[in-house]
Amino acid sequence: QVQLKESGPGLVKPSETLSLTCTVSGAPISNNYWSWIRQPPGQGLEWIGYIYDTEITNYNPSLESRVTISADTSKNQFSLKLTSVTAADTAVYYCAKDYYDSIGYTYFDYWGQGTLVTVSS
Amino acid sequence: SSELTQDPAVSVALGQTVQITCQGDGLRAYYASWYQQKPGQAPILVIYGENNRPSGIPDRFSGSTSRVTASLTITGAQAEDEAYYYCHSRDRRGNHWGLFGGGTKLTVL
């Protein structure tokens, strides 16, 4: 069974960098897609970006200038950095195992429990 | 357009059938996947691909796609199905950006 768990500070000051880590068990980081998704309070889901096979990344164009996703195969973890945060970045952040292929299948089959990050001074 | 559109709210009488729809150009290239989210919980995958259910998802959940519209059907809705439902697909212009619909609040009466 694949399990994911987010970790990181729950409070970040405006203009600083939000950093979260997702620890994965039950599946290797390599050769899989891994995404970050967020959900502001009372709102819908927003895809942030993915990392594939520890090197290939793809980001939501609305966040691309501020986002970096990286992976550490030795710890079976992947991480999110979001710079220059504002109150609008306050959200529950989820990590998820991502999948898509050339025949049109795309889905997130495993999710972490989510972690609330509040941007406030 | 790189958006997915869902009705904000839908209601169904207990035991009846309800369809939740999702429209978007990305559905020409990718099948929608559907997620159920209850308050305070992470989303869970209920339908993916042409009409596939992960292990543990009741068979009253089914999916279909026609051109730019994907549908999630619950046949014989139960009280525990009351939740938000989100569709997901990808941008069809080759960028493979992830897209989510705005979500549909399903109320079981």
Image (spheres, rainbow, N blue to C red):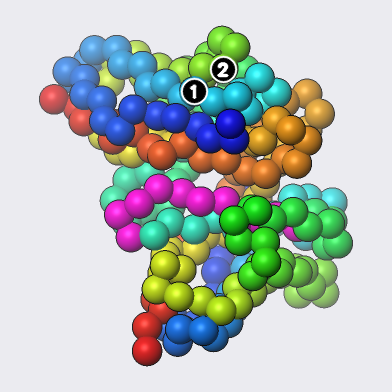
How far across and how far down the image is residue B36, in percent? Answer: 40, 38
Q: Residue at x 84, y 51 (%)?
A: A31
**Is A40 placed left or right of A78 in the picture?**
left
Question: What mark, if any, has residue A25 been given in the picture?
Answer: none
Residue drawn at 47 percent across, 42 percent down: B44
Give the chain letter at badge 1.
Answer: B
Circle 1: residue type: Gln
Q: Quadrant of residue A27?
A: bottom right
Q: Is residue A73 above or below residue B80?
A: below
The region drawn magenta spans A41-51
Q: Secondary structure at mark 1?
A: strand
**Looking at the image, residue B14 lies above or below residue A33:** above
**Label 2 amino acid?**
Val
Circle 1 residues within 10 Å: few <14, some 14–19, many ≥20: many
Residue B40 lies, in percent from the top left, at: 32, 56
| Left or right position of B75 against A55 | left
Disc 2 crowd, CA 10 A, few/some/many (<14, 14-19, 20+): some
| Residue annotated with mark 2 | B68
Viewed as shown, does residue A35 lie left or right of B11?
right
Give the residue drawn at x 30%, y 54%: A42
Q: Are marks 1 and 2 in contact (CB under 8 Å)?
A: yes
Q: Are marks 1 and 2 on the same chain?
A: yes
Instruction: Check disc 1 and report the residue beneath it.
Output: B23
Q: Is residue B46 magenta?
A: no
Q: Secondary structure at mark 2?
A: loop
Whole-percent x, y for residue A69 in the image: 71, 67
